[in-house]
Amino acid sequence: MKKGDKVILRSFFGTKTSNEAVEDQYNYWKLIGSLGTIKEIREKHSFYPEKGEQALVQFDNLDNLQLVAHNKAPNSLWCFVTDLSLQH
């Protein structure tokens, strides 16, 4: 995957649902099935290096779902590449 690719979020942090209770504003699993665009790629997350490469994905509906995100690109989240699939 590379910058500019259109992707679909197929899981979040490796799961289809949260393994524990999550506040609604942090329930990123609501984005599963959503389309986004890769804005940036990084080799690894500093706390989860074993999970591999991450992509900063900009979604259309992050604000509409009232999800919290604190990234330089609006409506964007860092996602592990293993949670994404290319849109065909």
Image: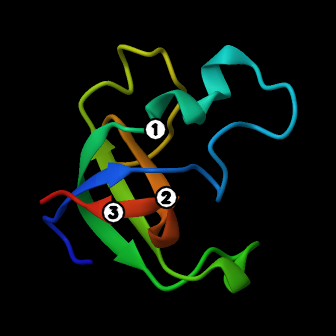
Q: Position of residue 70 (x, y in %)?
A: 50, 40
What's the distance in space between the residues labelled 3 and 2, CA to CA?
A: 11 Å
Q: Which mark is residue 85?
A: 3
What's the distance in space between the residues labelled 1 and 2, CA to CA?
A: 11 Å
Of badges 3 and 2, the one in the foreground is 3
Q: Position of residue 79 (x, y in %)?
A: 49, 58
Q: Which mark is residue 43?
A: none
Height in image: 54 above or below 88? below
Whether residue 73 is visible to the viewer of this picture, yes or no, is: no
Q: Residue furthest right?
A: 20
Quarter containing the N terminus: bottom left
What's the distance in space between the residues labelled 1 and 3, CA to CA?
A: 11 Å
Disc 3 crowd rating (10 Å Cα; few below 14, some 14-19, many 20+) is: some
For the residues bearing labels 3 and 2, Cβ distance under 8 angstroms: no
Front in this rendered view, residue 70 or 41: 41
Front in this rendered view, residue 5 or 58: 5
Of badges 1 and 2, the one in the foreground is 1
Counting residues from the start of the chain, the first of labels 3 and 2 encountered is 2
- The residue that mark 2 highlights is 79
- Give the SS element for disc 2: strand
Who's the residue at 35% across and 75% down the image? Answer: 41
Who's the residue at 62% across and 19% down the image? Answer: 25
Image quarter of residue 88: bottom left
Counting residues from the start of the chain, the first of labels 1 and 2 encountered is 1
- The residue that mark 1 highlights is 32
- Amino acid type at circle 3 is Ser
Who's the residue at 22% across and 77% down the image? Answer: 2
Height in image: 48 above or below 64? below
Front in this rendered view, residue 79 or 18: 18
Image quarter of residue 28: top right
- Amino acid type at circle 2 is Cys
